[in-house]
Structure formats: C-alpha cells, structure tokens
Image: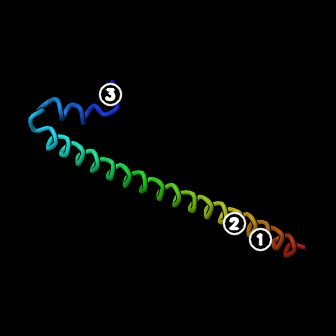
Amino acid sequence: MSDTPRMETALLDAPDAGFANIWRVGCEIERELTESNQIIRQQQLLQEENLRLQERINRLEEENDSMRADLLLWNEKEVK
C-alpha cells in the first residue's frame, strides 16, 4: 500500500486532469490537517485547564483540612 493513496487515486482517476485533481486532493488534505491540529490544540488547552483545576481542588482540600484541624483545636480549648 502506498503512503499517499489519496494523491495517487486522484491522479489515476482522471489522468488527463492530473494536476488539477492532485491540487484539489492536496487542498482537502491540508484542510483536514489544519482542522486536526486545531482539535489537538483544543484538547491540549483542555488538559492544561483540567490540570490547573485539579491543582486548585487539591489546594482547597488542603486548606479545608487545615481549617477543620484549627476548628477542632479551638473547640477543644473552648471546652476546657
């Protein structure tokens, strides 16, 4: 199997219109590549945002644990 089957098919389907077909297929492939790259970039941005939010959640949980510990200590002092 060829590594450029779409380009070769474009040439074989209409050899008399060879360059025009190859140009058309090349443009379609380039559009698909651009769209794929945009999707990949969006996924990367979402992964970065997810990581940032996970880190924030972890910080908030740590602060919550610290505040609970402080509250328990405060309550123990109030009881005495």
Residue corresponding to mark 1: 71
Say left or right for 26 vs 76. left
* Pointer 2 local density, CA inside 10 Å: few below 14, some 14–19, many at least 20: few
* Quarter of image, res 75: bottom right
In this picture, is 47 found above or below 80?
above
User: Who comes first in sequence, dot 3 or dot 1?
Assistant: 3
- Residue 49 locus on image (x, y percent): 51, 61
Q: CA distance from mark 3 to mark 1?
A: 70 Å
In this picture, is 63 found above or below 5?
below
Circle 1: residue type: Leu
Which is closer to the viewer, label 3 or label 1?
3
Q: CA distance from mark 2 to mark 1?
A: 10 Å
Circle 3: residue type: Ser
Say left or right for 34 vs 51. left
Observer-nearest residue: 7 or 61? Answer: 7
In this picture, is 18 found above or below 62?
above
Residue corresponding to mark 3: 2
